[in-house]
Image: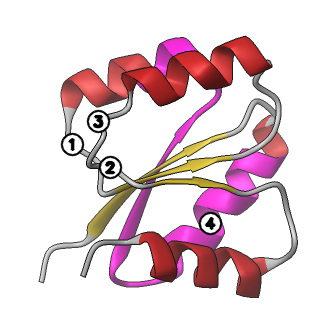
Amino acid sequence: MEKKQILAVCTTPSILAVIQRLINNNPNWQCTGAATLKDVIQYFNQQPFDLVLLGSGLTEQEERALIAHVNQKTPLVKHYGGGSGLLNCEIMQALPV
């Protein structure tokens, strides 16, 4: 089984590192971290993602641009904290079966 590809977006490097570590702890998931809208666009042009996890730090305008750029078939989850259990549940609920 191929790993589900997840793009995590957060502008705070230390938080993004924790999110990536938590996601990568699941053997079925692979996380790529993006700190800017420019990074998001670059990564989306390089490979498809099964899920986008939107964390904190982007402006409302940047969030709208990100949502507009993400493939409509790619689930987008807004995650602004709450612990690893919540993070795992949000991802599992949103990932396509």
Q: Which residue is mark 4?
A: 21
Q: Residues within 10 Å of mark 2 (few under 14, many from 20)?
A: some
Image point 87% across, 72% down: which residue?
82
* Residue span colored magenta: 15-40
User: Which residue is disc 3 drawn over?
Assistant: 71
The residue under label 1 is 48
Q: Is there a contact, CB below 8 Å, between mark 2 and mark 3?
A: yes
Above or below 11: residue 78: below
Tell which of 23 and 66 is nearer to you: 66
Q: Position of residue 12 (x, y in %)?
A: 82, 35
Indicate the secondary structure of the residue bearing disc 3: loop
Q: Could you tell me how far apart the alpha carbons at marks 4 and 1 are, in whole angstroms?
A: 20 Å
Kindly identify the amino acid type of the residue bearing the numbered disc 2: Thr
List x then y, in percent, for residue 10: 71, 38
Q: Are marks 1 and 3 in contact (CB under 8 Å)?
A: yes
Q: Point out the residue furthest to the right here.
A: 82
Disc 1 + disc 2, Cβ < 8 Å: yes
Q: What amino acid type should be assigned to the residue bearing mark 3?
A: Asn
Dots 4 and 3: beta carbons under 8 Å? no
Q: Quadrant of the N terminus?
A: bottom left
Q: Is residue 26 magenta?
A: yes
Residue placed under numbered mark 2 in the picture? 74
